[in-house]
């Protein structure tokens, strides 16, 4: 996994935690830290989380490197 993918995964996890807080407690952690949903910094964070989700979408279709298919034997 590349460094970009690791950073994207961390941002995606942050976004998921934020959505969980919104869903369960109606509390937007990103907005409360960075000055509301309409602040420029909050919008940048939301945008970065969205881009991270798109980057991680590629991981969904990446073949598993640890999986090795055994060749079939003739009987």
Image (cartoon, rainbow, N blue to C red):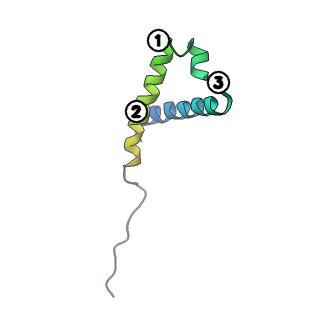
Q: Position of residue 40 (x, y in %)?
A: 47, 11
Quadrant housing the N terminus: top left
Count of numbered circles in the view: 3
Dot 2 and dot 1 residues touching (CB under 8 Å): no
State the residue in front, 59 or 19.
19
Mark 1 or 3, nearer chain start: 3
Q: Position of residue 35 (x, y in %)?
A: 57, 11
Quadrant housing the C terminus: bottom left
Q: For the residues marked 1 and 3, what is the alpha-carbon distance in whole angstroms?
A: 19 Å
Task: Tell me which residue sits at (41%, 54%) in the image.
Answer: 64
Q: For the residues marked 3 and 2, what is the alpha-carbon distance in whole angstroms?
A: 29 Å
Badge 3 density bin: few <14, some 14–19, many ≥20, Cα 10 Å: some
Q: Secondary structure at mark 1?
A: helix
Q: Which residue is mark 1?
A: 40
Left or right of residue 65: residue 20: right
- Dot label at residue 4: 2
Q: Quadrant of residue 50?
A: top left
State the residue in front, 13 or 37.
37
Task: Tell me which residue sits at (45%, 33%) in the image.
Answer: 8
Q: Secondary structure at mark 3?
A: loop
Q: Which residue is mark 3?
A: 27
Q: Secondary structure at mark 2?
A: helix
Mark 2 or 1, nearer chain start: 2
């Amino acid at each position: 996994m590349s460094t970009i993918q690791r950073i994207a995964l961390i941002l995606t996890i942050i976004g998921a935690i934020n959505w969980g807080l919104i869903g369960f407690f109606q509390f937007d952690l990103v907005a409360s830290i960075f000055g509301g949903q309409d602040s420029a910094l909050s919008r940048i964070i939301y945008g970065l989380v969205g881009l991270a989700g798109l980057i991680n979408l590629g991981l969904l279709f990446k073949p598993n490197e640890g999986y090795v298919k055994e060749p079939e034997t003739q009987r």
